[in-house]
């Protein structure tokens, strides 16, 4: 499996990060690209074998390319065009990365609320009564 241009940003994001973050990203990419995607593809999850395993293209349910321009009408979705074109399908790799990405975002928001909400609420209440925070006071020392 080679790195396609549509996949490179997934891996290259780790370049300016600390080594432990790079390892975390690399392990996550390995888990998705080399374990989960092949399992989903070869078990034909979501009829995955009708489409290439790793591509950013859009497809119809039968595996043909999706006619995006016939579905769009001046930047909005045409219901008639969508009815003719049918349902949209994406590759197994992108389906899993989107799903895991949304799950990660949801879990970060949930974690922040569960473990840090008291600090956030206290800071918000304090900011309503305090005219200047410490960062603003420190920045006053520097002319614009």
Image (tube, rainbow, N blue to C red):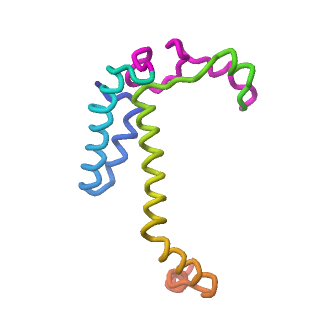
Residue 27 appears at what percent x and percent y?
26, 43
Q: Residue at x 63, y 87 (%)?
A: 129
Magenta stretch holds residue 74:
yes
Q: Residue at x 44, y 25 (%)?
A: 91
> Relative to 51, is 126 on the left or the right?
right
* Region rendered in magenta: 47-75
Q: Quadrant of the C terminus?
A: bottom right
Against 4, is 112 above or below?
below
Residue 24 appears at what percent x and percent y?
28, 50
> Relative to 47, is 19 on the left or the right?
left
Q: Residue at x 74, y 26 (%)?
A: 73
Residue 84 appears at what percent x and percent y?
69, 15
Q: Residue at x 45, y 39 (%)?
A: 99
> Relative to 112, is 30 on the left or the right?
left
Q: Nearer the viewer, residue 10 or 32?
A: 32
Dominant secondary structure (helix, strand or loop) of the stretch shown in magenta: loop
Q: Nearer the viewer, residue 97 or 26?
A: 97
Quarter where residue 47 is shown: top left
Against 95, is 60 above or below?
above
Magenta stretch holds residue 18:
no
Residue 92 appears at what percent x and percent y?
41, 27
Q: Nearer the viewer, residue 131 or 40?
A: 40
Q: Quadrant of the N terminus?
A: top left
């Amino acid at each position: 499996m080679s790195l396609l241009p549509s996949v490179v940003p997934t891996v290259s994001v780790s370049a300016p990060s600390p080594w432990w973050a790079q390892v975390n990203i690399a392990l996550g990419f390995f888990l998705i690209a080399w374990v989960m995607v092949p399992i989903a593809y070869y078990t034909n999850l979501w009829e995955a074998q009708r489409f290439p395993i790793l591509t950013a293209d859009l497809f119809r349910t039968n595996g043909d390319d999706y006619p995006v321009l016939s579905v769009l009408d001046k930047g909005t979705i045409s219901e008639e065009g969508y009815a003719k074109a049918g349902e949209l399908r994406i590759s197994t790799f992108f389906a899993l990365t989107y799903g895991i990405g949304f799950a990660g975002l949801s879990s970060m928001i949930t974690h922040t609320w569960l473990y840090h909400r008291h600090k956030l609420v206290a800071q918000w209440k304090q900011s309503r009564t305090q005219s200047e925070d410490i960062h603003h006071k420190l920045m006053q020392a520097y002319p614009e």
